[in-house]
Amino acid sequence: MKISSLAEVHQVFLSFRGDQLRYSFVSHLLDAFERHGILCFVDKDELRGQNMTNLFVRIKESKIALVIFSTRYAESSWCMDELVMMKKRVDKGKLQVIPIFYKVRATDVRGQTGEFGDKFWELAKTSRGYQIMQWKEALECISNKMGLSLGDKRVS
């Protein structure tokens, strides 16, 4: 992946959760972006437990965000907070977001049901009411957009 200087702006912000994605689907996606000269920001260098200021700056710098919803996405308050920031940018017309549903149904993301919902409500138990409301609004907004579904079945 290209190393960006402060003067370069990331064209794509990639939001996802979990090593199973990082070392499979995401690694192939990043390779394709690099081959085509597309700058992409992935938070692999962010330190856990640090504040999210740098991530929010990267979201603001990006023109497009890809959100890869998986069953583990809703485990992470970081992912959920990134999603809230993306929704704010979408609402201002400054960001295009493309959801990718990786082995989850869009309706489960939208309604916080199924295995995705189980993870969301587990996280919600340790969160504040206003925060939960923002997360739900962001999930509904982003999951309603035209996206891509990737399941277990292969199409021949």
Image (cartoon, helix red, strand yellow):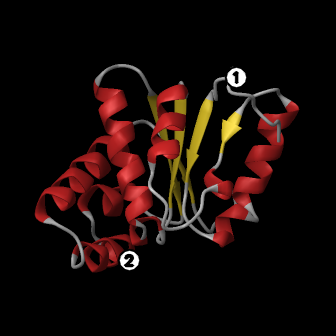
Q: Which mark is residue 115?
A: 2
Crowdedness near tag 2: few (<14), some (14–19) or many (≥20) residues, C-alpha within 10 Å: some
Give yes or no for contact between labels 2 and 1 (Cβ–Cβ under 8 Å).
Answer: no
The alpha-carbon separation of the residues under discs 2 and 1 comes to: 39 Å
Q: Give the position of the C terminus as an image quadrant.
A: bottom right
Question: At 28% from the left edge and 41% from the top edge, which residue is drawn?
Answer: 141
Question: At 51% from the left edge and 45% from the top edge, which residue is drawn?
Answer: 55
**Quadrant of residue 121 in the image?**
bottom left
Question: At 61% from the left edge and 52% from the top edge, which residue is drawn?
Answer: 43
Q: Which mark is residue 151?
A: none
Name above or below for residue 16 compared with residue 1. below
Name above or below for residue 40 compared with residue 105. above
Residue 127 in sight from this viewpoint:
yes
SS at mark 2 in the image: helix
Residue toward you, 7 or 143 = 7
From the top left corner, tell me how far across and down residue 105 is, in percent.
41, 61
From the top left corner, tell me how far across and down residue 85 is, in percent.
36, 41
Q: Which residue is mark 1?
A: 8
Q: Residue furthest left?
A: 129
Locate residue 52 relative to residue 141 in the image: left or right. Answer: right
- The amino acid on which the numbered mark 2 sits, given as a three-letter code, is Glu
**Nearer-N-terminus badge (2/1):** 1
Name above or below for residue 58 compared with residue 52. above
Residue toward you, 79 or 152 = 79
Residue 144 in sight from this viewpoint:
no
